[in-house]
Amino acid sequence: MKSSRGFSLIEVVVALTVLSLISLAVVTALRTFAMTQERLDDVSSRTSEMRTVNRFLNRALVDALPLMRGDAAGSASLLQGSSTELIWAAPFSASSRLGGVMIIRLFAAEGGLKMQLLPFYDAQQEMQWERAEVFSVVPQLDELTLTYFDAPSGAWVNEWHTFQVNPDRIRISIAANGRYWPDIIVRLNDTEDNFF
């Protein structure tokens, strides 16, 4: 008489345990891969945003015009800045609707780093920012610090209001989404002062 051979209960339990461990390892590996891909996408998105903002600010600031505002008390550069706001005039072409020499305002506001544009007519014109459209440059801004390099003194200063020239360089420090960006340092083109 032939005895039928099959799997014992212990062999079945061991086989199921090994299969469960393999399945758990595969599911864990897939989840880790998906999380890694999400993190890579986040890093890539942040890096792309930093590069775009850096390129835009460099292009908009490097050609800041050395225009002077004059009155009976004297003259001062049209470029004015504090640690959280900067106003300057530069050639600007964003679209067929916005172009030519513009007065640009970069400032920290609730909800991010913002920018406004006004057409430039002359250095004495009223700055009617309440009428200018607000554009978002960096959403979810945590911190903005602007500093200005005064070439004659060789020092970085926090304000640029009464100077008769544009600063040699402007440093922009940004923190967004809980992370600090590398500082953006823009050296302005050196051209002669113009009075309007």
Image: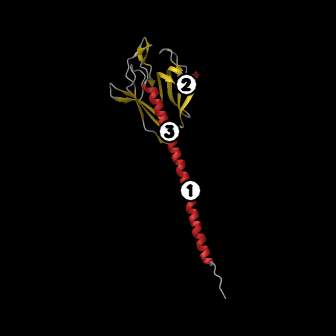
What residue occupies the far bottom of the structure in this picture? 1
Q: Which residue is mark 2?
A: 95
Q: The N terminus lies in which quarter of the figure?
A: bottom right
Q: The C terminus lies in which quarter of the figure?
A: top left
Colour scheme of this structure image?
A: secondary structure
Q: Secondary structure at mark 1?
A: helix
For the point 50% across and 25% down, which residue is it? 105
For the point 50% across and 44% down, which residue is it? 43
Image coordinates for residue 146, horizontal then vertical, percent: 44, 31
Viewed as shown, does residue 171 lie left or right of 13?
left
Q: Residues within 10 Å of mark 2 (few under 14, many from 20)?
A: few
Whether label 3 touches label 1, CB < 8 Å: no
Q: Which residue is mark 1?
A: 30
Image coordinates for residue 166, horizontal then vertical, percent: 40, 22
Image coordinates for residue 4, horizontal then vertical, percent: 65, 82
Quarter of the view holding residue 131: top right
